Image (spheres, rainbow, N blue to C red):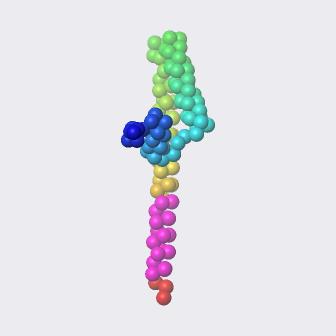
Amino acid sequence: MTNTAEPNASSIWRCCAQSRARQSGSENSTKDTIMMLLCYLAFWSFLIGFSALLLKGAIDSDVNHTLLWAFYVIGLLFVSFVTGAIKIGTDAVEKVKIAERQAATIAKMRIELEP
């Protein structure tokens, strides 16, 4: 008599894949995965290139390192612009959610008031 309680390897992998899909909400397609990898590659390439520019600027500039201070100010401006854009975007999303909740409440009140 065979032991039916012991699962085979394919059923274990299928179970793991299903549980991963349930945990993540949806599986990424190959196109999405490649796009994410390319974004990370571009981001890290930019960081390495910018670091090389900073190093070259530190080596070539005068004692005060004027170029490095200029890069620092540009970086602060960039961070402040990104922070402002995120703040504006989240405020707009919150306003839309509040408006939808208010519209749903008004519609519910109208249904309750109708004879």
Magenta stretch prevailing secondary structure: helix
Q: Where is residue 5 in the image (x, y as percent from the top left)?
A: 38, 41
Comparing 68 with 83, the one in front is: 83
Outermost residue to the right: 31
Q: In which quarter of the image is residue 19?
A: top left
| Vertical arrangement, residue 90 with respect to residue 83, above or below | below
Identity of the residue drawn at 48% across and 80% down: 111
59 is higher (above) or lower (below) than 8 = above
Looking at the image, which residue is at 50% across and 69% down? 103
Residue at the (40%, 38%) spot, across then down: 2
Residue situated furthest bottom in the rendering: 115
Magenta range is 96-112
- Above or below — where is 23 with respect to 72? below
Q: Is residue 13 visible?
A: no
Task: Tell me, yes or no, whether the highlighted magenta stretch contains residue 48.
Answer: no
Identity of the residue drawn at 45% across and 36% down? 8
User: Looking at the figure, which quarter contains the N terminus?
Assistant: top left
Residue 100 is inside the magenta segment: yes
Q: Where's residue 42, x and y in %?
A: 57, 28
Of the pair 7 and 114, the residue shown nearer to us:
7
Position in image of residue 31 (x %, y %): 61, 37
Query: Observer-nearest residue: 3 or 65?
Result: 3
The x and y percentages for residue 18 are 47, 43
In this orientation, which residue lies closer to the viewer: 65 or 50? 50
On the question of residue 9 being in view, the answer is yes
Which residue reaches farthest front?
1
